[in-house]
Amino acid sequence: MPTVIFQLPDGTERKVTAESGTALMQAAVSNGVEGIVAECGGNASCATCHVYVADAQCELVGPPNDVEDEMLDFTAAERRPTSRLSCQIQLSDALDGLVVHVPEEQV
Amino acid sequence: MTSAAGVVVVGGGQAGFSVVSTLRASGYGGPVAVFAAEPHLPYQRPPLSKKAHTEPDGVRVELVPESFYRERDIDLRLGEDVIALDPAARTVLTRAGRRVTYDHLVLATGAHNRPLSVPGAELDGVHALRSLDDALTIGRALTTAREVVVVGGGFIGLELAQVARARGARVTVVELTDRLLSRAVSAELEPRLRERHERASVRILTGTAVQALEALEGSGRVGRVVTSQGVLPADLVVYGIGAIPRDDLAREAGLAVDDGVVVDEQLRSVTDPRISAVGDCARHPHPHAEGLVRLESVQNAIDQGALVGRRLAGSPAGYESLPWFWSDQGEIKLQIAGLRTPSDAVRLVAGDSPDRLAAYAFRDGRLVAVETLNWPAEHLSARRLLERRTPVSAAELAGTTLGALVRARRAAEVRA
C-alpha cells in the first residue's frame, strides 16, 4: 500500500497510507487531511482538491488530463507547473513516497 | 436517561457531517453527537445516481472512515432515529426511548422522495432512489432489466436514464411537464440537453402523465406503464419526481415550517435560536434570491453545515455562498452556478468545441447565473466571478466568454 505525504500550509505534514487504485483526493479525505475540500466528491466538477506535486515527482505522476488541465486555470490558489487535481491522481505502488503540497485556499 | 449536552445533530448526511467535522476543525471542545437514521457511515449521495450502478461492486461512498469520528470524539449513533423534539426541555427522543439533552440542536434531516401516487406503485420492480440501499437495489435490478421506464425528467431521472443505457437497457423517460429539468435549467438550454439524451438513444416523452403501473399476468412484478400517450413495456421502473423536506420533527415541536424549517440568515430557527437547520430541510434567506429559498445540493449541504459548525465554535456569519449544482448524465456534464429566475434574459453561447455550450442569465443587464454543458472552465469562471459578486454586464460579455474575462482580469491584477 503506497504511503503519501501531504504538506499543509501551516508547515505540518500528514502521512497517509491508502490502497492502490484509490484516488489521492479520497486518501486525503478518508484520513481527514485538512485543506482537501473535494466538494464534488471526485467528479472533476469543482477544483477544490488542488495540490502541488513535489518538483522531483512531477514526471512520475504525469500531466493533467484535458478537463483537469482546463479546470486548473481556475483554482482558488495560483496555478503552478506542478498543479494537479488530487481526484485525478490514482495511487499505485509506483507512487509510494509521493509528496504533495496543499495550497492555502481551495474555494 | 439523558446524556451530556453540547451539540446534537439530527441527520447523518452530508450536511450533518459538515456540521460536526467543522465543529472539531474549528476547535469546539464540547460534546458532539450525531443521530443517523441509516445504519451506514455518513456517505456521499451524488455517486449513487451517477456511478454506483456502473461499477458492480459499488463505489466506496463513505465520507470518512469510522476512525475519523472516534479520533475526534464525535458520538456517532448509526441507526438511531430521532422521533420527537422538545424545545422547552431542550431534549430529543430517540426511537429506542433514549432522551438526549442539547445546548444546541442542528436539524440536518434532509428530504424524502415525493411518492409516486398511481395504482401499481407498490409492485416489485418499481424503485425510487435516495439512499445507498436504494442504489444497491437498483444496481442489482439493472443487471437483468431490458426495458426501463424512468418517471421524472429531473436530475435523478436523467442520470439514471443514462446509467441504464450504459447497462444496455432500452430507456424511456416520462415527464409530466413540457420539458426536462423544468425548474433547474432555462428554456433556452433545455432543447440542447434533450437532443443529447436522444442522441444517446434515450427516448423522451414530455407532457406525458403516468396513470398506472400494471403487473405481468399472475405476478407481482411490474410489466407495463400506462401513460397519457400510450402503454410502455417495462421490467424496471425508477422514479424521481421531486423531494419533500423532512421537517416533521420541527413542525410537531411548534417551530416555524414552510416546506422546510424556516431559519434566519445565520440558519437559526426563527422560532428558537437554540435550534438550527441545514441542507435540504432548511428554508432560508439568501442574498442571491428574493424571499426565502430551499436548496437541494451538495454545495448547500456542505456550506450550510460548515457555517453552523463555525458559528457554534464561536465565529458567527450570515449565509451567502454562491449556489452551484452539477449533474453527470452519461457523457453530458451539466453545471449550474447562481440562481436564475424565469424572468431573467438568457443568451446561449457556443463553446470552443461542438459538445460545449453555455447559457448566461442576466437580470437588469447583470450576469446572475450560468448553465454549462461539458464546459468546466466556463462553469468555474462563472463561479469565480459570481462568488465575488464581481459585476459582469451583458455588454462586457458580448463576443467573449467568462473564461477569457477571468484570464484578462487576472493578468491585469498581476500587472497592477
Image (cartoon, coloured by chain):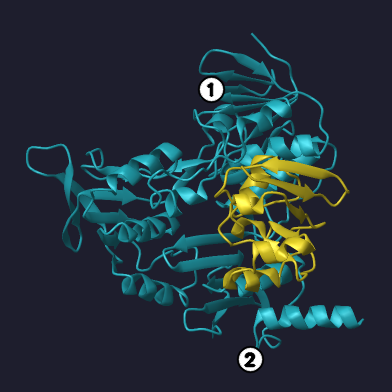
Chain colours: A yellow, B cyan
Task: Decide which of tag 2 and tag 1 comes sooner along the chain.
Answer: 1
When the figure is inspected, residue B359 is found, relative to residue B238, above or below; the finding is below
Q: Check disc 1 and give the amino acid type.
A: Glu
Question: Which image quarter holds the C terminus of chain B?
Answer: bottom right
Outermost residue to the bottom? B399
* Residue at screen point 12% across, 37% down: B219
* Whether residue B1 can be seen here: yes
Q: Residue B126's quadrant in the figure?
A: top left
Outermost residue to the front? A94
Q: Residue B6's quadrant in the figure?
A: top right
Residue beneath label 2, please? Answer: B399
Residue beneath label 1, please? Answer: B80
Left or right of B278 in this view: B265 = right
Secondary structure, mark 2, is: loop
Outermost residue to the top? B1
* Whether residue B267 can be seen here: no
Question: Which image quarter holds the N terminus of chain B?
Answer: top right
